[in-house]
Structure formats: C-alpha cells, structure tokens
Amino acid sequence: QVQLVESGGGLVQPGGSLRLSCAASGFTFSRYVMRWYRQTPGKERELVAYISSGGGITNYADSVKGRFTISRDNAKNTVYLQMNSLKPEDTAVYYCNARPWASDYWGQGTQVTVSS
C-alpha cells in the first residue's frame, strides 16, 4: 500500500532553517508529481510547493517563494523541503502528498514551529 512518512520538523527560531523529508513507498515514485502542503488549526490545507516527476519543474506558493526549495531523489524515493528564513507564520503541520492512480495519499504530517 502507499505510504508517505514525513520527518524533520521541530522547533526553530525565526530566521532559522529546517529540512523536511518524505519517504515514499508502495508506488512508482519517479512517475509522479510530489507536493508539500501545510495546515494550521481552523484553516484549510495549503499547497506549499510541488515538483514534477523528474524534478525539472517546481512551483511555490507566493508566501514561501525564495525561502523554500523542494527537491527529490528518485533513487531514494524521497522528496525534500528545505525551509530557510523561517517566519512565525510558517508554523504549521506539513504534509507530503502523492496522487498515484488519481487518488490522494497523505503522510501523517510533521509539526514545524517557528518561535523565539
């Protein structure tokens, strides 16, 4: 079955950095777009970034453009989100997402808290 396992979240001060990872299994990872979303209590899940199957195309929400970088290693079935210059408003649970066979799959999420 499809599994997505996020890691790398934590508590960081404003201006700091974190790198999230999402290890995927159960589908042919290299064939699919991968996405990172985030969600805060009471708000809808927000698309943060996505990356094409081969990694050549990326796109970002305006709120993170220039600060976050999405990448993938198809040999390791892993997608990453490098987050720099973190702000308190980046605090959220971050989820990776895949859509093999036109169905949405989600990881369990990893908490990112930006606070001094």
Image (cartoon, helix red, strand yellow):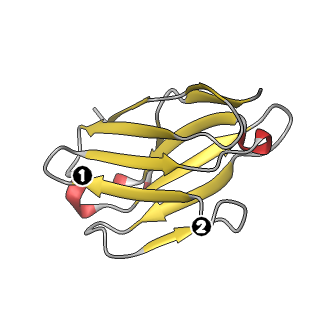
Taking the image as drawn, is residue 104 in sight?
no
Look at the image and tell me in which quarter the C terminus lies. Answer: top right
Name which of mark 2 and mark 1 comes first in the sequence: 1
Q: Amino acid at mark 1?
A: Phe
Residue in the picture at 30% in, 55% down: 72
Front tag of 2 and 1: 2
Q: Is residue 67 left or right of residue 26?
A: right
Q: Is residue 97 left or right of residue 41?
A: left
Q: Marks 2 and 1, Cα distance to the nearest angstrom?
A: 26 Å
Q: 53 or 57: which is nearer to us?
A: 57
Secondary element at image label 1 = helix
Secondary element at image label 2 = loop
Q: What residue did someone put label 2 on? A: 66
Residue in the picture at 44% in, 57% down: 70
Q: 101 or 13: which is nearer to us?
A: 13
Q: What residue did someone put label 1 on? A: 29
Residue in the picture at 70% in, 35% down: 92
75 relative to 91, above or below = below
80 relative to 116, above or below = below
Question: Residue 102's image quarter?
Answer: bottom left
Taking the image as drawn, is residue 69 in sight?
yes
Q: 98 or 90: which is nearer to us?
A: 90
